[in-house]
Amino acid sequence: MGSVIELTKHLVQMNTINPPGDEEACARFLGNILEKAKFSVSLHPF
């Protein structure tokens, strides 16, 4: 994931419409990016 534009394109394509609340794939995707940048990430289901 190189640019902000590419990141935005990828995020806009994800189905996160609520309901039913399908945000898990998006959260994991962003979590992976943050972990690669050396952030500590915890995902909490709700």
Image: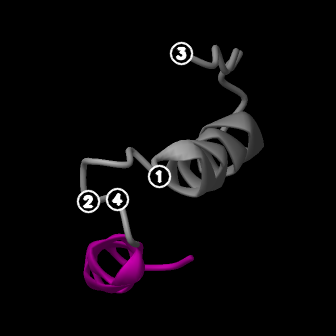
Spatial separation of the CA atoms under disc 3 and disc 4 = 14 Å
| Residue sticking out furthest to the front | 20
Spatial separation of the CA atoms under disc 1 and disc 4 = 5 Å
State the mark number for residue 43.
none
Question: CB of mark 1 within 8 Å of CB of mark 4?
Answer: yes
Name the element at disc 2.
Answer: loop
Question: CB of mark 2 within 8 Å of CB of mark 4?
Answer: yes
Spatial separation of the CA atoms under disc 3 and disc 2 = 16 Å
Q: Earlier in the sequence, mark 3 or mark 2?
A: 2
Horizontal placement of 37 versus 21: left or right?
right
Q: Earlier in the sequence, mark 3 or mark 4?
A: 4
Residue 5 lies in the magenta-colored region: yes
Question: CB of mark 1 within 8 Å of CB of mark 2?
Answer: yes
Name the element at disc 1.
Answer: loop
Please tell me which residue lies in front, 10 or 15.
15
Residue 10 in the image: x percent, y percent?
42, 80
> What residue is disc 4 on?
16
> What residue is disc 3 on?
46
Name the element at disc 4.
Answer: loop
> What residue is disc 2 on?
17
Which stretch is magenta?
1-14
State the mark number for residue 22.
1
Give, as a three-letter code, the residue at label 1: Asp
Q: Residue at x 60, y 39 (%)?
A: 34
Spatial separation of the CA atoms under disc 1 and disc 3 = 11 Å
Please tell me which residue lies in front, 10 or 1.
10
Of the 4 image quadrants, the one containing the N terminus is: bottom right
